[in-house]
């Protein structure tokens, strides 16, 4: 069940990076919801590899083939299954991994767990390639949520030590939302975006990689979604987000910064505006006691640097238990953060639709 998530919306991701195809099965989608295939295709292209100088040179069309679950592009109540064919693989680049695991990758623990039978090509089922099926499911959920007035947007918050401007925690304009969706390198500050791109290219030239963070905002979510303790909305979102490969941390609102505040600084005072209760600030990130407050949901996700780098690294030869030097070959993103932006949006959409249907 490790590749299955959800309660009301149940997604199951299948495939490996170099298998014939990857895909997802989605059970629980409300019937009668139209799926705009062109819009879904545009969303998929935001994540697709080989579209930028700062991403992997592996280029895949990432064309979605929906096998079932729709009748004339409308959900019919049956599970929806969709696949993406893998067309540009170079499996020979990974033959060494069963013998010499990459530091900071799943190679070694997977070798032990699966007794050496795991698919090492391109990272197999542990690959970031499996975020494409997540984007299929999330892209459909985004369309359903938008009809209910709920919008989700994300941007590159940081790469290395370069920080972008932050979202206004009180909300996001329609213009900013559309601009981020259309951007090749989604930052709020064009200048910071250029600095981030330069940092990624510099790391790549050195045979290295760099990590960063993605900030996500949700607007239009009504108050009262979620529940206390283990039913918390923030816990549900975080659980789904940690299903994205390379995620190492999630923080909501002021996050870890709240630990250094006084209560008088962290508390969000209530007010009434246009007959509606809201807060004057949003350090809570739109969630209190696991329940949505009606304010924008705001959180950041931390991504580690790509483990596959061409710089020499120390590893071990598994057959002899001797230390050895490892030089990784193949095609890899020097920084996965830019392509992770739509993935964060997608997974957030899945979690929110699941929470709405629970409510």
Image (cartoon, grey):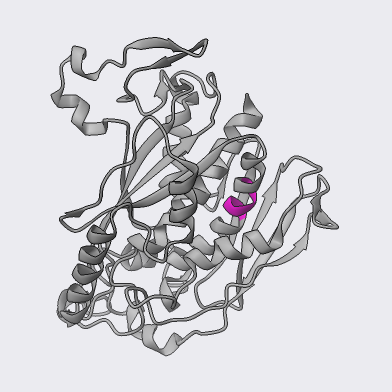
Q: Nearer the viewer, residue 109 or 144?
A: 144
Q: Nearer the viewer, residue 16 or 159?
A: 159
The single residue placed furthest to the right in the displayed view is 71
Magenta region includes residue 138: yes
- Residue at image position (41%, 26%) is 286
Coordinates of residue 273 in the picture (x, y in percent): 45, 14
Rendered view: 349 above or below 107: above
Q: Nearer the viewer, residue 210 or 122?
A: 210
Indicate left or right for 175 with 141 as reference. left
Magenta region includes residue 245: no
- Residue at image position (32%, 52%) is 188
From this viewpoint, is residue 315 visible? no
- Residues in magenta, as a range: 137-141
Total count of labels: 0
Coordinates of residue 95 in the picture (x, y in percent): 38, 85
Q: Nearer the viewer, residue 234 or 73?
A: 73
From this viewpoint, is residue 253 visible? yes
């Amino acid at each position: 069940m490790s590749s299955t998530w959800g309660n009301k919306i149940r997604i199951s991701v299948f495939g490996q990076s170099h298998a014939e195809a990857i895909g997802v099965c989605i059970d629980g989608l409300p019937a009668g919801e139209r799926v705009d295939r062109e819009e879904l295709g545009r969303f998929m292209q935001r994540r697709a590899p080989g579209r930028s100088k700062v991403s992997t040179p592996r280029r895949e069309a990432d064309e979605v083939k929906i096998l079932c679950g729709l009748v004339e592009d409308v959900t019919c109540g049956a599970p929806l299954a969709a696949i993406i064919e893998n067309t540009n693989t170079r499996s020979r680049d990974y033959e060494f991994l069963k013998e010499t695991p990459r530091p900071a990758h799943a190679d070694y623990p997977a070798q032990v767990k699966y007794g050496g039978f795991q698919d090492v090509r391109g990272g197999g089922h542990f690959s970031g390639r499996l975020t494409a099926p997540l984007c299929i499911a999330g892209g459909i959920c985004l369309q359903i949520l938008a009809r209910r007035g709920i919008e989700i947007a994300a941007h590159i918050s940081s790469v290395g030590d370069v920080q972008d401007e932050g979202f206004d925690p009180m909300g996001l304009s329609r213009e900013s939302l559309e601009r981020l969706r259309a951007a090749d390198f989604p930052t709020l500050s064009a200048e910071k975006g250029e600095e981030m791109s330069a940092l990624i290219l510099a790391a790549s030239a050195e045979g290295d990689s760099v990590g960063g963070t993605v900030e996500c905002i949700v607007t239009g979510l009504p108050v009262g979604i979620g529940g206390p303790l283990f039913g918390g909305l923030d816990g549900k979102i975080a659980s789904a987000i940690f299903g994205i490969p390379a995620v190492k941390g999630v923080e909501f609102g002021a996050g870890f910064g709240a630990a250094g505040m006084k209560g008088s600084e962290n508390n969000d005072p209530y007010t009434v505006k246009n007959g509606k209760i809201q807060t004057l600030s949003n350090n809570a990130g739109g969630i209190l006691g696991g329940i949505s407050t009606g304010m924008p949901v705001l959180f950041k996700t931390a991504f580690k640097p790509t483990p596959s780098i061409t710089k020499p690294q120390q590893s071990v030869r598994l057959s002899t238990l001797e230390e050895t030097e490892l030089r990784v070959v193949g095609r890899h993103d020097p920084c996965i953060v830019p392509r992770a932006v739509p993935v964060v949006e997608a997974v957030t959409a899945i979690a929110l639709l699941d929470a709405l249907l629970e409510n």
